[in-house]
Image (cartoon, grey):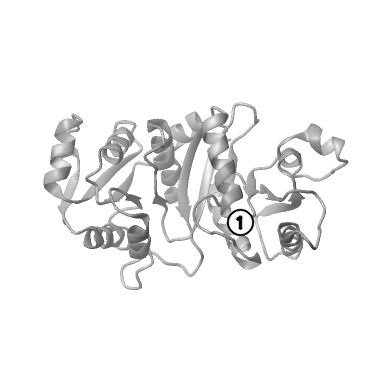
Amino acid sequence: MIKNFEDVLKIAKERGPKIISVACAQDNDVLKAVDNAFENGIATAILVGDKEKIEAICQEESIDISKYEVIDIKDNVEASLKAVELVSTGKAHLVMKGLVDTAVILKAVLNKEVGLRTGNVLSHVAVFDVPTYHKLLIVTDAAMNIAPDLETKKQIIENALVVSRALDIDEAKVAVIAAKEKVNPKMPATVDAGELVKMNEAGEINGCIVGGPFALDNAVSVEAAKIKGIVHPVAGDVDIMLCPTIEAGNVLYKALAFLSNAKSAGTIVGAKAPIVLTSRADSEDAKLNSIALSVLMAAKM
């Protein structure tokens, strides 16, 4: 069982290495992350972008550029399309965002001719190794869908299940997070939670147990659930937390990342292959973890 990021890195090495296609690779942090993944035996890379700038950064960071194929395309839009095309044609297994706006790389991912579109929504899935929690914790969606409706939430759960399966979780426990534990018509998040539970019970959402609405404490704490009289397989043992809005997801993500001393990884799911979008604020470990997580996903996909 994969219990922490040490396990993630170890098993990614066993199931890899995979090939990363880096869009607009002329970025110090991204090149260091890719080289770190190479040195750990997790992945290699095809670097697409401004070759002169890539070479200069590699020299500056003491990265041996001869380990990587470099495709010289200076225009960001064209470089993003090429990076995505490498994945759609099977020459690479996952795509990673370099020095380019997120909107540009996602537009390339959704391109009808060379893209990786599936018809599903794209959503952000984060994985946390929290010192005070007994297993890896998946949080979604903190970065993509602003105010998802019921159908979008269903797809966000299904996207998160791609990640949980990559982490060898056979039947993930999903908590639909709200501000209270009972359905209240005045609180749309609780109404959606009730409907998602019904979908799960009817077999419309498979491969998991969905519970909700749950306040955060009852999802992660057995004691808190007992005090509230909540008896449910998900209570205190959640694998995936579905947040009601992007604000809630983002606040939870940042709180875990910056206040709890948690290790983290993140990826975009919903395309034919994983999309690695790391932030400049992410630590080097978080960037490596994100690549490793995406390698595990690519191995299962």
In depth, the one of 285 and 187 nearer the eye is 187
- The residue to which callout 1 is attached is 157
Q: Is residue 25 left or right of residue 11?
A: left
In depth, the one of 7 and 63 nearer the eye is 63
x, y percent for residue 112 = 35, 73
Q: From the viewer's perspective, is residue 261 above or below residue 248?
A: above
Point 60% across, 26% down: residue: 131
How many numbered marks are there?
1
Q: Regarding mark 1 in the picture, which secondary structure is present there? A: helix
Point 41% across, 36% down: residue: 282
The crowd level at tag 1 (other Cα within 10 Å; few <14, some 14-19, many 20+) is many
x, y percent for residue 300 = 47, 51
Residue type of the residue flagged with mark 1: Ile
The residue most toward the left is 52
Point 42% across, 50% down: residue: 298
Q: Is residue 123 left or right of residue 32?
A: right
x, y percent for residue 115 = 35, 66
Residue 167 visible, this orientation: no
Point 78% across, 48% down: residue: 180
Instruction: Examine the image and state in which quarter residue 28 appears.
Output: top left
The residue most toward the right is 229
Residue 112 visible, this orientation: yes
x, y percent for residue 191 = 76, 61
